[in-house]
Image (cartoon, rainbow, N blue to C red):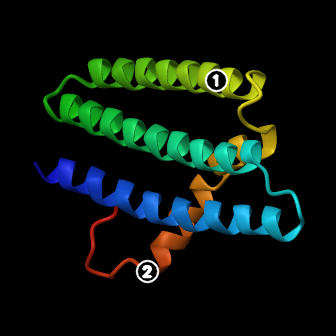
Amino acid sequence: MESRKIVFKETAIMGIGMLLCVGVMLGLYAALGYWNRPIWLGGILGGVLAVLNFFLMAVGTSLAADKAEAQDVKGGKSLLQMSMGIRYLVLIVVLFVLIKSGLCEVLPTVLPLAFIRPILTFGEFFRKTGDEKA
C-alpha cells in the first residue's frame, strides 16, 4: 500500500511541474506570436502523454520491486523490460499519429518529454529532509 501512495504522490508532483512547464512553453509561443491550435494542442497532449508515461513507469517499477521483494528478481527484471518496451512503442506510435495527422506541431508535442528530468530534479529541492526518496 505504501508504494501506491508513493506512485501517486510522485505522479502528482510530476503533473504539477508539467502543468507549469507546459504553461511557460505555451506562454513563450504566444509571446513570440506563434499561437495556433496545433501549438497549444501539441503542448497539452504532449504534457498529458509525458505524465501518463511517468505514471505507467512508476507503476511498473513498483510492481517489479514487489516481485523482487518476493524473491522473484528475474521476474521483476523481465517485467521492467517488457513495461519499458511497451510504453516506448505506444508512446512513439501515439506521437507519430498526432504529428502526422497535422493535429499537433512537432516541437511542442515532443518537448514535454524533455521536461521530466528537470521537474524531478527541481522537485528534490522542495522535498522535506525526512521524506523517503521514491
Residue 87 vertical placement versus 22 (above, below): above
Q: Which residue, given by chain and number where applicable, does mark 1 sit on?
A: 92
* For the residues bearing labels 1 and 2, Cβ distance under 8 angstroms: no
Residue 105 vertical placement versus 71 (above, below): below
Q: Which mark is residue 108?
A: none
Q: Is residue 75 left or right of residue 3?
A: right
Give the image quarter of residue 34. Answer: bottom right
Q: Is residue 113 left or right of residue 80?
A: right
Q: Secondary structure at mark 1?
A: helix
Residue at the spot 27% in from the left edge and 53% down from the top edge: 8
**Can residue 134 be seen here?**
no
The count of marks equals 2
Q: Which residue, given by chain and number where applicable, does mark 2 sit on?
A: 126
Quadrant that contains the C terminus: bottom left
Q: Earlier in the sequence, mark 1 or mark 2?
A: 1
Residue at the spot 27% in from the left edge and 39% down from the top edge: 62
39 or 6, which is in the foreground? 39
Residue at the spot 81% in from the left edge and 62% down from the top edge: 29
Residue 65 vertical placement versus 118 (above, below): above
- Residue type at tag 2: Phe
Q: Is residue 33 left or right of residue 105?
A: right
**Can residue 24 be seen here?**
yes
**How far across and down, in percent of the image, does residue 112 sit?**
64, 50
8 or 98, which is in the foreground? 98
**How far across and down, in percent of the image, does residue 73 sit?**
27, 25
- Residue type at tag 1: Ile
